[in-house]
Image: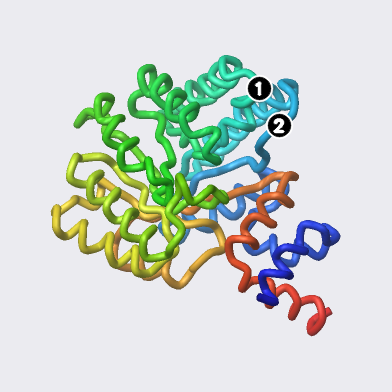
Amino acid sequence: MFNKIIAWMIPFMPGKLVWIFSKKYIAGETIDDAIKISRNLNANGIKITIDLLGEFITNLEQAAENKQAYLSIIERVQKENIDGNYSLKPSSFGLLLDPEICYKYIREIVAKAASYGNFVRIDMEDSPCTDREIELFRKLKKDFPGNVGLVLQAYLKRTLQDIKNLKDIHSAGTPLNFRLCKGIYVEPEAIAFKKYQEINRHYLEDLEYMFANGYYPGIATHDRPLVEGAYQIIEKYKVPKGRYEFQMLYGVSPELRSSIVEKGHAMRVYVPFGKEWFGYSTRRLKENPKMASLIIKAIFVRG
């Protein structure tokens, strides 16, 4: 309870205090910071996905700025020969303001990545965005079949049906590429599973459907039981190691991450950076209130 209270208070604390927590999970504020972290991860056999922080903009000028920023990021990452791809949030490009402009801007970004033979992941946001983001993915995959993927959230009760509904755009040559995560947004019980075991059960059900139908899943989890469950499904379907990957957030569960890599499985780490780190950090803390005690210790014990 103490940790939850502290986690609730964090958004109201000075940025310098929140940074004590944040720096473990964020590459930094600049692309130089992200490149440095990415190069270190690559040196340890880990691929990356770069994400510029910021979401739910309030005007389309911000959307245009974000588009230009991503085009520059792609140029820089490719120039540096980083082994990685890109993740973005459609709300950063005006999804809830003007869906057509959002599509236009994101299409430019995907086209830029595709020109280098690279890939863009469409992040899934809260439930008001779900249908729009699935439709956005459909449109982009039509023009860039091997260069775009989608995030799906296992805690939503609709997710397995969404996976099945997208089967019409799947092909063996360009399989559907999904990052499957548990889900982080606070959603009503009417549309989202709430209990730990229940969410895990549906996560593995979704993952098994993907493997059974030849999709390419990004198994995004820091939960050891889910990792073990994934191993069992991979063995059950004799899935080649080039047909899936594990994914984790930067700074989270490094020991589990290392054990997965040591077993020879592909690993990709989500590397967020940017000046809009505060909102991302406070959300991470709300997901993991146990971190609050570490922040308090850092402030009062180490000063």
Q: What residue type is labelled 1?
A: Leu
Q: Where is residue 120 in the image (x, y as percent from the top left)?
A: 47, 33
Describe residue 9's horizontal placement relative to residue 118 as left or right: right
- Give above or below for 270 relative to 253: above
**SS at mark 2 in the image:** loop
Q: Depth check: 258 or 192 in front? A: 192
What's the residue at 85%, 60% (across, down)? 14
- Give above or below for 13 relative to 32: below
Indicate which disc residue 97 carries: 1
Q: Do the CB atoms of the residues marked 2 and 1 lie less than 8 Å apart? A: yes
Of tags 2 and 1, the one toward the viewer is 1
Instruction: Say few, some or many: other residues with alpha carbon within 10 Å of mark 1 (under 14 / 14 to 19 / 20 or more).
Output: some
Q: Position of residue 226 (x, y in %)?
A: 34, 63
Q: Can residue 261 be seen in this view?
A: no
Q: Where is residue 12 in the image (x, y as percent from the top left)?
A: 82, 58
Q: What residue type is labelled 2?
A: Ile
* Residue, disc 2: 57
